[in-house]
């Protein structure tokens, strides 16, 4: 069972200019996930997938392969379905695990556990999610609570699963079949789909400038490696 990892990375982005190449602590953002991926032994191959050759040297620096996708599959109108299908048609494999470089605080353990779950054969599609255990709405309508009843403690509420998308996994054959039948394979079609929970810092995704600044400060604080003692108001 050949398991391939793909890191999709466009050169240009709307909200944060060239965010995948932007430096945090003198290291490009994309390097943070690459540093972890190369230490996961569950992948037969790791590919950095981009339209821009600027990423080819980064791939070489991390001893991973580079796949140059067609320019039109890096436009604002191109979908994850489209560039994933293009990749699957060019790069042989049985399982594809996609890791987004915009989630630099994902852990090596989470990546390996996700890949291991996908390789178990239980699911055709595996999607990373974040549990929102609080009152949630959809189109201004309550989902997991009754607005006419007393508000329960949040820890007793049914959690809502929100896509985290830092990690996605598909079986090649099922994804291609769903693309033929439905024009989409991203969500798993009609096959068995599993959900892998991410928590805490791993759920942070860089989409806007303020996201980048927040993650940057977290990474810089981790570099200091200071763990202050836990203290409370009123204690000496």
Image (spheres, rainbow, N blue to C red):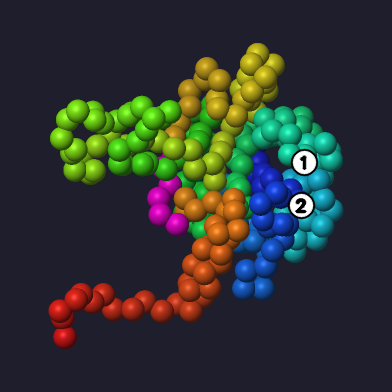
Cα separation between marks 1 and 2: 8 Å
- 205 left or right of 89? left
x, y (%) of residue 109? 47, 54
Task: Tell me the residue at 20%/75% (across/down).
Answer: 232
Could you tell me if residue 197 is visible in this image? yes
Q: What range is drawn magenta here?
A: 196-201
Task: Tell me the residue at 80%/41% (across/down).
Answer: 69
x, y (%) of residue 213? 56, 64
x, y (%) of residue 138? 41, 30
Q: Secondary structure at mark 2?
A: loop
- 63 left or right of 161? right
Q: Secondary structure at mark 1?
A: helix
Q: Who is closer to the viewer here, 111 or 78?
A: 78
x, y (%) of residue 33? 60, 57
Determine contact: label 1, label 2, CB under 8 Å.
yes
Screen quadrant of the C terminus:
bottom left
Task: Tell me the residue at 67%/56% (across/down).
Answer: 16
Residue on which the image places disc 1: 74
Could you tell me if residue 37 is visible in this image? no
**Is residue 199 located in the magenta-colored stretch of the structure?**
yes
- 146 left or right of 174? left
Crowding near pointer 1: few (<14 within 10 Å), some, many (20+)?
many
**Is residue 227 located in the magenta-colored stretch of the structure?**
no
State which tag comes first along the sequence, 1 or 2. 2
Crowding near pointer 2: few (<14 within 10 Å), some, many (20+)?
some
Screen quadrant of the N terminus:
top right
Q: How many marks?
A: 2
Q: Residue furthest top?
A: 181
Residue on which the image places disc 2: 11
């Amino acid at each position: 069972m050949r398991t391939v990892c793909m890191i999709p990375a466009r050169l240009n982005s709307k909200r944060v200019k060239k965010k995948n190449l932007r430096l945090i602590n003198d290291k490009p953002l994309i390097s943070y996930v690459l540093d972890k991926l190369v230490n996961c032994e569950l992948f037969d191959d790791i590919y950095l997938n981009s339209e821009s050759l600027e990423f080819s040297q980064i791939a070489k620096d991390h001893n991973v392969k580079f796949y140059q996708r067609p320019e039109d599959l890096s436009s604002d109108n191109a979908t994850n379905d489209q560039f994933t299908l293009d990749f699957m048609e060019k790069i042989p494999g049985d399982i594809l695990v996609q890791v987004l470089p915009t989630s630099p605080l994902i852990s090596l353990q989470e990546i390996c556990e996700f890949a291991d779950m996908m390789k178990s054969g239980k699911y055709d599609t595996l999607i990373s999610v974040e549990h929102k255990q609080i009152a949630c709405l959809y189109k201004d309508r309550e989902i997991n609570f009754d607005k006419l009843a007393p508000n329960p403690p949040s820890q007793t509420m049914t959690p809502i699963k929100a896509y985290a998308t830092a990690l996605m996994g598909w079986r090649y054959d099922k994804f291609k079949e769903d693309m033929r039948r439905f024009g989409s394979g991203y969500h798993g079609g009609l096959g068995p789909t599993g959900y892998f929970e991410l928590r805490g810092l791993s759920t942070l995704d860089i989409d806007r400038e303020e996201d980048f600044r927040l993650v940057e400060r977290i990474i810089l604080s981790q570099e200091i490696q200071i763990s202050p003692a836990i203290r409370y108001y009123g204690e000496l």
